[in-house]
Amino acid sequence: MSHTHRIQHHTRHRTPHHSSHPPRTGSEPVTARSPLRMRLWFSVWGLLWAAFGTTAFALTGRTGWAVACGVLLLVVAADLAWVAHRLRQGPHFQPGRDIPPYEPPDPR
């Protein structure tokens, strides 16, 4: 089997025609979409645990751990604010499944 034929054979079997996903363009790292609603709930979960950890460690006198949880609380709160901001911007910045993938960027 020639090298070209092997590549065509391998490519043909890697991307089935019956797939419900759009074809890969090779630009996915540049045009990837973040699952913001999932990130929102993870941030809420992290916020609750960081607040609990800060309080628990502060009450038990473990200042270092309380400070670490407090810093984590601030980071998670900033992420939560950023995710909420992006969600409020609407589908232009977070397209749904009915919006096709972005076109690949122009090579420079």
Image (tube, rainbow, N blue to C red):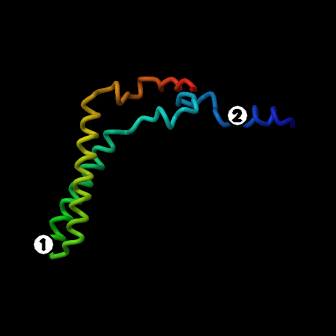
Q: Residue furthest right?
A: 1
Q: Quadrant of residue 46?
A: bottom left
Q: Is residue 77 left or right of residue 11?
A: left
Image: 93 above or below 69: above
Q: Residue furthest bottom?
A: 61
The residue located at (70%, 32%) in the rendering is 12
Image: 45 above or below 92: below
Residue pointed to by mark 2: 11
* Residue 66 percent location from the top left of the image: 20, 68
* Residue 10 percent location from the top left of the image: 73, 37
Q: Secondary structure at mark 2?
A: helix
Q: Secondary structure at mark 1?
A: helix
Q: Nearer the viewer, residue 81 or 98?
A: 81
| Pointer 2 local density, CA inside 10 Å: few below 14, some 14–19, many at least 20 | few
Residue pointed to by mark 1: 59
The residue located at (47%, 32%) in the rendering is 31
Q: Quadrant of residue 86?
A: top left
Q: Which three-letter amino acid code belongs to the residue tagged 2?
A: Thr
* Residue 79 percent location from the top left of the image: 28, 46
| Pointer 1 local density, CA inside 10 Å: few below 14, some 14–19, many at least 20 | few
Q: Which three-letter amino acid code belongs to the residue tagged 1?
A: Leu
Distance CA(mark 2)–CA(mark 1): 60 Å
Q: Nearer the viewer, mark 2 or mark 1?
A: 1
Q: Nearer the viewer, residue 13 or 76?
A: 76
Q: Nearer the viewer, residue 75 or 25?
A: 75
Q: Residue furthest left?
A: 59
* Residue 104 percent location from the top left of the image: 53, 26
* Quadrant assignment for the C terminus: top right
Q: Is residue 24 left or right of residue 99?
A: right
